Amino acid sequence: MKWVDFVPATDTLFRKEMMLEAEKALGVKMNLETVNGNDLQPRVTAGIQSGAGPDLIMAFNNQTYLYANSVVDMTDLAEEVGKREAASSPTPVRSAATARCSCPCRGR
């Protein structure tokens, strides 16, 4: 689940190109649900409480810290990807250490 981008072309690129490439590379079918930014936090909260939320959430600000007991910390993976991508990026890549990437943990 992710918020609807302010630039509609970004969501189109994500759905029609990036997701298709990821599905092919990973061999899995993905279902992307987008919600308005103001609706993201209540939807994530409801998903965690019900145990039926999305497998991955795109969060911003401090929201993942709000759910620290209900998500799996993926900072190590984010750090690895950030370092790998920084070498090939013409623009600075934000340190993954400042982002806490998480996915809801089922069964907790």
Image: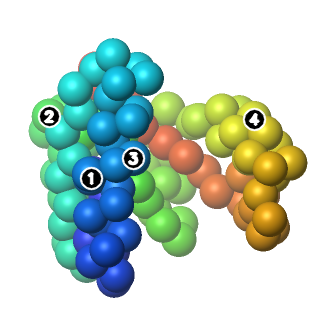
The residue lying furthest to the right in this view is 87
Which residue bears the numbered disc 2? 52
Query: Is 4 placed above or below 15 here?
Result: below
Kindly report the distance in space between the C-alpha atoms of the residues bearing marks 4 and 3.
20 Å
Q: Residues within 10 Å of mark 4 (few under 14, many from 20)?
A: few
CB contact under 8 Å: marks 1 and 3: yes
**Residue type at numbered disc 4:** Glu
Image position of 94 (left or right of 41): right
**Closer to the N terminus: mark 2 or mark 3?**
3
**Residue type at numbered disc 2:** Ala
**Closer to the N terminus: mark 2 or mark 4?**
2
Image position of 75 (left or right of 6): right
**Closer to the N terminus: mark 4 or mark 3?**
3
Kindly report the distance in space between the C-alpha atoms of the residues bearing marks 1 and 3.
6 Å
Which residue bears the numbered disc 1? 15
Q: Residues within 10 Å of mark 2 (few under 14, many from 20)?
A: few
Which residue bears the numbered disc 4? 80
Q: Position of residue 17 (x, y in %)?
A: 34, 49
- The residue at the point 18 percent across, 52 percent down is 33
Q: Position of residue 94 (x, y in %)?
A: 74, 63
Which residue bears the numbered disc 3? 18
